[in-house]
Image (spheres, rainbow, N blue to C red):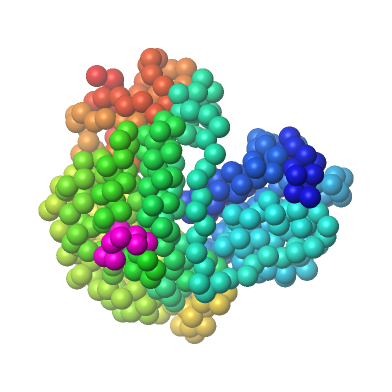
Amino acid sequence: MIYEYMKHMENKQFFIKTFGCQMNQRDSEIMAQSLSRFGYVEGMDIKDADLIILNTCSIRAKAEQKVMSLLGYLRKTKEKRPDMKICVAGCVAQQEGKSIIDRMPHVDLIIGTQNIYQIGEYLLAAEDGKHRVVTQMEDNYQIPRFLPNIPFSADSADAEKAAFQFSRFVTIMQGCNNYCTYCVVPYTRGREVSRMAKDIVDEVTLLVQSGVKEITLLGQNVNSYGRTNEVCPDNSSYNFSKLLRQVSSIEGLERLRFTTSNPKDLTDELIACFKDVDNLCPQFHLPVQSGSDNVLKAMNRKYSIAQYLQQVEKLREYCPTIALSTDMIIGFPGETDEDFEATMELLEKVKFHGSFSFKYSDRPGTRSSEFDNKVDETIKSERLARFQSRQDEISLERNEEFVGQEKQIMVEAIYEDSVKGRTATHHIVHVKGQVNTKVGAMLKVKINFAGQHSLKAELI
């Protein structure tokens, strides 16, 4: 039956639209790999697709609204092309389930966050009009062993494929046990589960052997990797620091990154990796969310600003060149003028290289959505504008520190008259002129200009 289905699907095109975070990007890659075993090929245009997958994010209301808007647009497309299949995956699928089909009956399949590895089988069932909603969440869920197909090398003459290949995400865990009061992740991705260390090392090894130069390890809270389930039968104390060191030793891996971390689980052992591991990039995204202890307590973040500043101090002691970035939620329920001033004070103390900052918005099912001390939208907007304006100034100041320095960049894109690359600290660098190079190559450059969001350099 499956063989006949694969013959039926052969050379049919699918298109994935990804909303939200890097975890979703990686999930889209996994679905694409899984579909290739069922005869699908990835297309570049949504208008030509036989299968459209919307991989959704529900962290913020705006992302969810975009999904529903696109589904509304696809209704007319489905009327013209009834054989086209529409699938909603990811966090909104997990959260809303059958209600999506109640609102959008032209959707063929709803698939939850724990079910993406079996998307081909569920599409087969959907062909018969069955199992249109697959969002079961298992308490004892285990991430399946998954090794990607590598249909091409990073040295491929196809520049687009090579660009996709030189840097890849690798999932090391899924879900979260922290239950921050504003966050939907424990409800949409389940309880925290770590992937077997051998599966991670095998996947990274395969990717590097295919020509990948840079790996980013992904999880909702990578600092707690290995704490909730056994990940290495031969080593009961195996943790994220040990995984970092093992992955970093894979021959041919030039750059290693990871995201995201919770400050409450950041250990001295992990901080020491920035000093000891040569190919671990000196860049750390450490979300703080607020500069006020009162707000952090209301968020259930389980650390204080004093503890956070101690971590920052130790990180810079072990790795003076480290670039720090963060997340900030502005206007959390109950945030007073004094609380916000504490956030601005933290910004001045740490001087983050960059930050992702957003106005608080209620998310369904979270504890904070039931708080009654909401901040007025106008006040939230004013505070956010002030924070982002000062962050832009600090980012420019930080970038100006690079002017005159020699840096290595990894090439990400090649244009007719310039090259774009990225430093180990994750800064974008533009090099003017024609350069004989390829995507994924390392270039030594001298920074000669700093802007708010990127740098310019000359080739050495």
Image point (24%, 70%), residue name: 305
Using the image as rendered, state which of residue 205 and residue 338 is in the foreground.
205
Extent of the magenta region: 231-240
Picture coordinates of residue 458, whole percent (x, y): 28, 21
Q: Looking at the image, how many numbered discs can be counted on the residues?
A: 0
- Camera sees residue 159: yes
Q: Quadrant of residue 233?
A: bottom left
Q: Residue at x 47, y 71 (%)?
A: 191
- Dominant SS type (magenta): loop
Q: Is residue 378 visible?
A: no
Q: Residue at x 66, y 54 (%)?
A: 119
Q: Viewed as shown, does residue 117 lie left or right of 304? A: right
Query: In the rendered image of this protein, does residue 134 appear above or below residue 17?
Result: below
The residue nearer to you, when weighing 204 against 162, is 204
Q: Residue at x 29, y 39 (%)?
A: 424
118, above or below 103, in the image: above
Residue 224 vs residue 159, the one in the foreground? 224
Q: Quadrant of residue 346?
A: bottom left
Specify the quadrant that holds the C terminus.
Answer: top left
The x and y percentages for residue 256 are: 32, 43
Taking the view exactly as shown, the residue that stands out farthest to the left is 317
Q: Is residue 236 on the magenta stretch? A: yes
Q: Is residue 327 magenta?
A: no
**Left or right: where does residue 55 sit relative to residue 326?**
right
Q: Position of residue 86 (x, y in %)?
A: 74, 52
Depicted 208 relative to depicted 395: above or below: above
Residue 393: image location, x then y, percent: 30, 48
In which quarter of the view is residue 56 placed?
bottom right
